[in-house]
Amino acid sequence: MKKLSNEDQKKLRSLLGDYCDQFKVVAAIPTRYSKIEGVTEKKAGAIEYISFIAYPEIDKEDNRKAFSDALLQAVLKSQNSLNELHKNFESPKEWPRIESCIRKGKKRYYKACVFWQAYTHFCNYVNQAERNESAINYGWHDFLIKYASFYQTYDDGFGFGGSKLDFQELYSNRLNFPNIKNHGDKEDIRPLRKHWSELKSSLNLVYGLVKAFEKEGVKSLPILNTLISNPFWVDDAIKSSQYKLAKYLLVMDKPQSYIKTDINPLQMPFLDLSFDPIFVRSEKIFQ
């Protein structure tokens, strides 16, 4: 990843400052978990960052909190920190409820990462075609189906299995009949489009996470347990997610002709580090 110059960083910080009061979801992390014995600031930040990827929407605050609570309780139980568990949770969950909540949040986190991969691939495809003045034969829905077809069987279908649709069959049909003007029957992929509409707001956060690991020479993300137990990545992920959010703002009013995916950066979470803020914080913005 090319390092931003100091001047570029300054411009992007200024842009974020201009829009701070317009973001739908803003938070400084870690928040409530910063004083729990046995849970470092970085580990608390990792838990909350992951929960924002899984539930980036403004109306999913309760789900986000339930997921982060479940992750934290799992950490405390695994450390046998029962005193801290009962000190911070009036009614701690039993393992079956914790596992159920984590599985639900993990599935959304997993899908968010897949959607980021698909969206990045699609944008690169369009940009390269336009540079080479080549025909653009595939649209965004084609890429959605391509990735869903792969992950429907990958990892026992954890993220996209259980669907009544055969994404592999849909993908094969689209390969045989490419047409940028005809995305096919949208009703065929209505559930997939719904999931995309819910999780596209976490694109900047997944980008930040991926770039933090790429900086270390790692090209694939580890499992959640590792992300939480070794949270070295939190600082870099948040900073990268901020600058990516600013870059989305720069092109917000200049959409590319073929990239019609309705990305709204103002609906993406703007996260900051409570112990290393990007700029002087206003209590009105961060609460």
Image (tube, helix red, strand yellow):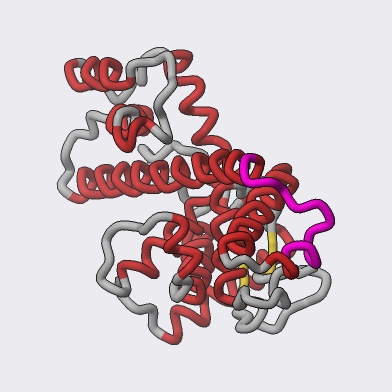
Residue 233: quarter of image: bottom left
Residue 110: quarter of image: top left
Looking at this view, is 224 or 251 the one in front? 224
Looking at this view, is 260 or 64 the one in front? 64
Image coordinates for residue 269, horizontal then vertical, percent = 62, 57
Specify whether residue 18 is in view: no
- Above or below: residue 216 compared with residue 136: below
Quadrant location, the C terminus: bottom right
- Above or below: residue 176 compared with residue 31: above
Quadrant location, the N terminus: bottom left
Residue 18 colored magenta?
Answer: no
Residue at the location (43% across, 20% down)?
163
Residue 172: quarter of image: top left
- Above or below: residue 65 compared with residue 181: below
Residue at the location (44% across, 37% down)?
260
Residue 88 colored magenta?
Answer: yes
Numbered label tally: 0
Looking at this view, is 9 or 72 the one in front? 72
Specify whether residue 68 is in view: yes
Q: Is residue 273 left or right of residue 287?
A: left
Looking at this view, is 255 or 207 the one in front? 207
Image coordinates for residue 69, horizontal then vertical, percent = 68, 55
Q: Which residues are magenta?
A: 85-96
Residue at the location (81% across, 52% down)?
91
Image coordinates for residue 164, horizontal then vertical, percent = 43, 14
The residue sitting at the bottom extreme is: 6
- Above or below: residue 104 compared with residue 48: above
Residue at the location (49% across, 57% down)?
204
Image coordinates for residue 83, horizontal then vertical, percent = 75, 69
